[in-house]
Every structure is written in C-alpha cells, then in structure tokens.
Amino acid sequence: MNFKRLFKGPWLWIILITLAVIAIISLSSNADGYKSVTTGTMVSYLDDNKVKDVTFVDGDQQIQATLDDGKKVKSKYLGDQGARLVEQAEKAKAGKQLKSFDVKVPKSNPVLSVLFSLLPIILIFLLIIYMMNNAAGGGGRVMQFAKSKAKLMTKDTPKTTFADVAGVNEAIEELGEIKEFLQEPAKFQAVGAKIPKGVLLYGPPGTGKTLLARAVAGEAGVPFYSISGSDFVEMFVGVGASRVRDLFEQAKENAPAIVFIDEIDAVGRHRGTGMGGGHDEREQTLNQLLVEMDGFDVRGGVILIAATNRPDVLDPALLRPGRFDRQIGVEAPDLAGRTQILKVHSRGKPIAPGVDLEAIGRRTPGFSGADLANVLNEAALLTARNNEKTITNTSLDEAIDRVISGPQKRSRLMNEDERRITAYHEGGHALVAAALPQSDPVHKITILPRGRALGYTMVLPDEDKYSQTRAELLDKLAYMMGGRAAEELVFHDPTTGAGNDIEKATGLARAMVTQYGMTERLGAVRLGENESQPFLGRDIGHARNYSEAVAAVVDEEINKLISYAHQEAFDILNENRDVLDALVTELLEKETLDKSQVAEIFKPLRRREVRPAWTGSETRVPSTRPPVATIPGKSYSGTNGTNGTPVVIGPDSGSDAPTPAAGDVHGDPELP
Ligand SMILES: Nc1ncnc2c1ncn2[C@@H]1O[C@H](COP(=O)(O)OP(=O)(O)OP(=O)(O)O)[C@@H](O)[C@H]1O
Ligand SMILES: [Zn+2]
C-alpha cells in the first residue's frame, strides 16, 4: 500500500480530524464521576450538613459536592440561588461542618473552542476540495495538481516501430538521426555533433505525427513521455508552468527519453496576443517551456518532439535555433503512401484475394493515414456484421463511402418525387463535369442518402494533383452549378438542395478573384488577408485591406464568375437533355453508378471545346512556341499547391453539412 498516496487523499484527513474532535470533546466533558441529583436534594444535603466539601462551578451553574459518606453528587442551580447557596456554604465552613469550599469559573478549553469555531470552515474547505476533485475528473488531482500528468507509457517504451508508419519516408529519414543519437549518444558527442533539442512535426490532422514520435521512442528503446498542449493550460494559474518543469524533471531522471507534446499550438502561440491582456496563463507556460529548453543539455539525452497542425501560429521564439530548430512536415500521403498505409493496416486482416489495395489508394486521394486506417476498420466491421470471412471489394467500397460521408440512411424514406429531383441534381453535376474538357472523370454517382447528403457525385483525378489551372477551376465552378441548373431546367423550380454547392462555388470564385489573380479587372493582386485569431485558434475573418470601391468590384467579379458558370451548366444540360434523361433513368433504377457505367452512358455526350487561351491582359500575348518536351517516365514531386482532393458534390438538407473527409471543393489547403 502506498502511504504517500493515501495521505494525499482528502478522505483520510476528514476521518482523522473528526476522530480527534470527538476524542477531545469526550475527554474534556464531565467524565468526573459526579452523580446528578435534583437541586432540592442538594439544598437539603447542605441544610443537613451532610457535605464534606463543595465546589461551585460558576459558568456552568453547577454545584459539585462530596458527601460525608464519600458519595459525589452534582446539581444545577439558578443564577440568583447561587448567592444564597454560597452564603450557606460559607456559614457551614465557618461552623467547621464543611472541610473545603471552592468556587470555580471554568475556563473554556482553548483547543476545543478554536476547533469548534474553525470546524465549519474546515468542513466547507474540505467540501470545496472534494467538489474540485470531482470537477477535475477525480483521482485526487487537486492535492497534487502541480504534478505533471505525463505518463511514462511503459518502462520498456512503446512497441511502435518505423515499419508501422507508412508513406512518410522523408520524416522517417529525418527522425532516424534522432533515433541513432538516442541509441548511441557517445558516437555523436565524439565528433562534436550537436543534436537538435527539439523536433517539430507539423501537418494536417491524422497524418501520423503521434505515431512517428512513438516510433522514434520504440526504435531507440527509450521511455516516451507524452502530454498534450491543452493539458498544460488547465485549471489553476501557474500550474501549466509547474507542469512543464515537472515533466522535464521526470524525463531527465529517466534519460535518454523522448518528451512528446501534442498540440503545442495550445501553449506555443505568439505571446502577447492572449485575450487577457497578454499575461495569461498560456504565456507563463510558454515561458517556462522556453526556459526548460534552454536549460536542458542535449547531452542529458532528452529530446523534445512536438506536434501541431498550425505551425504558422507558433511563437517565433519556439522556432529559433536551439529550440525546435528541426521542423519536419508530415503531409497527407500520396498514392504510393496511401497504398503502403493500407498495407500496414491490412496486416492481420483477412483480405479477399481479388482486392487490390493500390486501386483503393487510387480512389482515396486526400485521405489521411487516420482516414485510411478507418476505412479498413469499417470494412472489417461490415464484414463481421455480414457474417463473412474475408474483406471484399464491396465492403471496402461501402467503407470508403462511410468515411467520406457517414453511414447510409436506409431508413430515410425519400418519396419518388424527391428521389427523382435528387437523381436529376446529381446527374446534372456529373453530366456537366463529363462534358467539360478540363474536369476530372466522374468516378461515382449515387442517390443513396448518406450522412446529411441526399446523394453525391464524386469527381476524381486519375492521379494526385498539386495545382489547378484557371480552366480547370472554371470547369469546376460549372459542374458545381450543374445540380442547380438541372433542377431549373427540368423542374422549373429549384430546391434547397443546392445550398452546399452554392456555398462552395462562391468560396472558390472568391479565391479566384482575391487570391489567385484570375480576373482581368482586378489582376494578380492579393486582396484581403486571412486574419487568424490566435487565442481562439482559428481564422475568424477576412481582414479587408482594400477600398469600398474595390470591394464592390470583387463582389461583381464573383457574381460574374458564378453566373457565367451557372449559364454554362444550364446550356450544357439543355444540349444534352437526352443523355441526362438516360442517366437519370439508370440512376433511379440502380441508385449507384460507378465509373465504367457512367462512361458508357456518356458516350453520346456533346462535349465542350477547350477554353480559349487566357493571360488576363491583351498586352500579354501568349507565345506560340511550345514548351520543351518532358522526359517520358520521369515524374516530378510536387512542392506545394493543391493536394489532389476528390470533389464530392451532394445536395444537402442544410448548408452546415459536414465537409466530407476527402472532398473539399474549395479544398485548397495552403500548405504551411
Ligand atoms: N502514416 C501512417 N501510417 C500508418 N498509420 C497511420 C499513418 N498516419 C496515421 N495513421 C493511423 O492514424 C492514427 C492516428 O494518427 P496520429 O494520431 O498519429 O495522427 P496525428 O498526426 O498525430 O493527428 P493529430 O494531428 O490529429 O494529433 C494512427 O494511430 C494510425 O493508426
Ligand atoms: Zn449538388
């Protein structure tokens, strides 16, 4: 039994104090052996001179008497009786009938009275501690609130290895150095090499940052301490800072070790931007972190690994050399990476012989490692639920859909009219996409309600893409409006189903105007800045750094882009009404159409010409000389720009439908 632990709990103290109080009270109370008699009896004892000695206890209005036969008695008297009784006793004393006579004014027991007056306060205090304990999630936390919650996972460290992390080879290469250092620090010290104290892993959620950090510890065989940045910023002021101190103390004692801080942006944001006037708790914690980082000696063998989704908001002081001077990006995986991750996670799962993991990887651009792990898990769950033995393509298909937009809503009854409207809406998206020359192939159309969407159309690039041209964006705008245009064309009355499409199209058009410089009128000028609110941790608005006049032009240009796209979509559908009807007929019957089925139906489609050249100005005349030829077979890895995310378009019941995991239309994440 851990006694130290026991003394930290409030209950033991409560019990001890209560026992002590009871003991003191019972000791000092009248365990004196006097027998109570009535006042009348006492008076008659005195009158009859039967009393040997007598004591008046004033405050208590009590007479204690010892009788001639040794009996001890006591009784109460009234206030004005006292004087008479004393007189009587004095007389008896004078007449020698009484041996001794005494008056006591009892002093109240000082310990007892202090205790009694403090008792309510103590009880309230204990109650407050108890309640705070509960609020903090139990476990006697308040009593040890300064102790870091970092957990030493196991003494023999995580079992994760680099083999468990796929598709992030660059990061693994960089971290390999850290691993070697932790294994053989002497080798590095001998040549005077300085190992980074801190490594910052940054990248989108679910790409395996935590997994990587654990793998370093697992590979090097050192203890792994992990804590989340938001844990620092908890409860009382000053606690965050002492947590940091404690965490490092613990790690140093067990060095070589890895300290992992997840969500470091929770503590590591720019200082001086907190809402509480700059001197908030977070800032103290950050300062302590900086102090610790400066103070610890790498030769001590503690290496700090931190992870964040938002490296842009971190305090520059953290990123300075000597702190997190090594920064490693962990990006969403590319096709090869996705295939590898799928392989890692399919280990130990019975995959049916016909399943091609690379094909799955091809269909899941934009998925993070966590999404892919989720796909395989969902597929396994479905397989078990259907009492099947192996994971088939069918269950993997369903699993991908689930990860994108939630489980099927079989119970949602759509009446025939609504189903037909949905079919035309989705058919509209798909047809416009297929008729335009620069858009990606239609991969799937479904009118099965799923999540909050009534149906969706998935338009996917054949390979990962990192940037998009203006013509591609114009095509995208057009097919985003395709659903709405189909409703207008066929039913003469649009529905609310296009709400989400309109929202995304407007976002895309705004970006084309204000960020990508894709209009003639405004040119290649960046308009406005995304203002990030560090304390709230997200962008709260768009700061306008341009005039009212320009704002009006921006609005006009956005409008122009959208209405052009809308008209284009409408015209394409009108020209191809026969194909649209054929598509809808198939959709109503089969509910879901895959790539080859769609391609078959679209064979007679009247396709649009490639858009004319555009440079944004008449004075910039495009050259007729072609670019140099590319070396066949050589691939270039993208550096930045858009990640090839599939576009999923669905008419939604509301505008606040969740963004599908992999389908963000204006998903143009600005890579850090
Ligand atoms: N590259 C990968 N290889 C294998 N599995 C991965 C990979 N990336 C993510 N996963 C899976 O996803 C899970 C979640 O990943 P992890 O917690 O490491 O992501 P993260 O980048 O730390 O996310 P966050 O930023 O949200 O904390 C892992 O436990 C693992 O199962
Ligand atoms: Zn739509």
Image (spheres, rainbow, N blue to C red):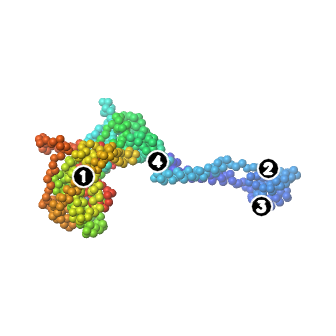
Residue under numbered circle 1:
560
Q: What amino acid type is highlighted by mark number 1? A: Lys
Task: Name the side, left or right, on which 25 lies relative to 554.
Answer: right
Q: Position of residue 253 (x, y in %)?
A: 41, 39
Q: Secondary structure at mark 4?
A: loop
Q: What amino acid type is highlighted by mark number 2? A: Asp
Mark nearer the N terminus (2 vs 4): 2
Mark nearer the N terminus (1 vs 3): 3
Q: Does residue 672 lie above or below 68 as drawn? A: above
Can you tell which mark lies on residue 235? 4
Q: Secondary structure at mark 1?
A: helix
Mark nearer the N terminus (2 vs 3): 3
In three-dimensional space, the C-alpha distance between marks 1 and 2, rounded to whole angstroms, equals 110 Å
**Res 32 quadrant in image:** bottom right
Q: Nearer the viewer, mark 2 or mark 4?
A: 4
10 Å crowding of disc 2: few (<14), some (14-19), many (20+): some
In three-dimensional space, the C-alpha distance between marks 2 and 3, rounded to whole angstroms, equals 20 Å
Q: Quadrant of ligand 2?
A: bottom left
Q: Position of residue 619 (x, y in %)?
A: 17, 41
